[in-house]
Image (tube, rainbow, N blue to C red):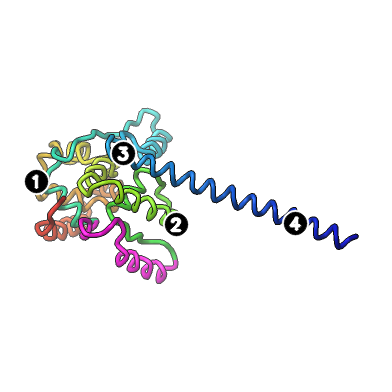
Amino acid sequence: MARRTSMSRWRRVLRVAALASVLAVTALLALQLWFFAHVLWWNWFDPGQTPFMRRELVRLREADPRSQLRHQWVHFGQISVHLKRAVIAAEDANFTAHDGVDWDAIERAYEQNRRRGRVVRGGSTITMQLAKNLFLSGERSYLRKGQELVIAYMIETVMTKRRILELYLNVAEWGVGVFGAQAAARHYFGVSALQLGPREAARMAAMLPRPRYYDVNRGSPALARRTAIVGRWMGSVDPP
C-alpha cells in the first residue's frame, strides 16, 4: 500500500513538472512572437521612445524630477555619410557582410571574459546593439546575450541593412539623456546630424562604448586616441 501511494505521488510530481515545462516553453515562444511582431512593425514605423530610453529617463528623474531626454528622429538621408562610416568603422566593421552576428568577435569576447572571470566584453554587432536598445536591458549576462542573438537574427531576416543602421543611429545612447544622432550632433557641436564633418563624426562614433562617461569627460585622452583611430578607419567604409 505504501509503495502504491509513493508511486502515485511521483506520478503527480511528474505531471506537474511536465505541465510546468509546457507552460514555460509556451511562454518563451509567446515572448519570441512578441519580439518578432515588433520587429515587423518597426521595419515600417519608427519606434519613438524605446524601453531603454524610458528606463534612462526614470533613472535621471530619481535625481532630478524635471529631467527630460533629448531625442529627435531623422531619416537616413538626413544623417551625415561621415557618421555612418564612422559608426560602422568603430562598432562593426563587418556590418554589411554578416547576418546579424559576428561569431569571430563573439569568440574573441568569450576568451577575454574567460580570462577576466566576468563579462567585460560582448562582441556585439550593430544589429545586436539595436536589439538590446529596442528590447533589452543593459545587464551583462549570457542569458541576455542569448536573447540578443535571437532578436538580431529576427531583425536581419526582416530589415535591410539601411533600415537597421537608420534605426540604430536614431536610438543609440550618446550621452547623459542624449539619444540619436540628431540630438547628439546638436548637443556636442550645435549642428544637425546632416552637417557633421569627418572629425565630428569620428568623435561621436568613438563615444559610443561609454557615452555617459565621455559626455562628462569630453577631454579624455582615451577619447582623443579612439577618435584618431576611427578617423583613420572610416575612410575605407562604404555604408549601405
Q: Residue lying furthest top in this view?
A: 66
Q: Residue lying furthest right in this view?
A: 1
Residue found 9% across the figure and 50% down from its top: 198
Q: Which residue is mark 4?
A: 11
- Type of amino acid at the residue the image marks with label 2: Ser
Q: Quadrant of residue 41?
A: top left
Residue found 38% across the figure and 32% down from its top: 64
- Of circles 3 and 2, the one toward us is 3
**Relative to residue 203, is residue 34 drawn left or right?**
right
Dot 1 falls on a residue whose secondary structure is: loop
Q: Nearer the viewer, residue 89 or 201?
A: 89
Mark earlier in primary sequence (1, 4): 4
Dot 3 falls on a residue whose secondary structure is: helix
Span shown in magenta? 92-117
- Type of amino acid at the residue the image marks with label 3: Trp
- Check residue 141 in the rendering and tell me which mark sits there, or answer none: 2
Q: CA distance from mark 3 to mark 1?
A: 29 Å
Q: Indicate the position of residue 195 as horizontal and vertical percent values.
A: 9, 40
- Type of amino acid at the residue the image marks with label 1: Gly
Q: Indicate the position of residue 31 as horizontal and vertical percent values.
A: 47, 44
**Relative to residue 120, is residue 96 drawn left or right?**
left
Q: CA distance from mark 1 to mark 4?
A: 70 Å
Q: CA distance from mark 1 to mark 2?
A: 37 Å
Q: CA distance from mark 2 to mark 4?
A: 36 Å
Dot 4 falls on a residue whose secondary structure is: helix
Q: Indicate the position of residue 70 as horizontal and vertical percent values.
A: 27, 34
Discs 1, 2 touching: Cβ within 8 Å = no
Q: Which residue is mark 1?
A: 197
Q: Indicate the position of residue 211 as horizontal and vertical percent values.
A: 28, 48
Q: Vertical placement of 12 versus 120: above or below?
A: above
Mark earlier in primary sequence (3, 2): 3
The N terminus lies in quadrant: bottom right
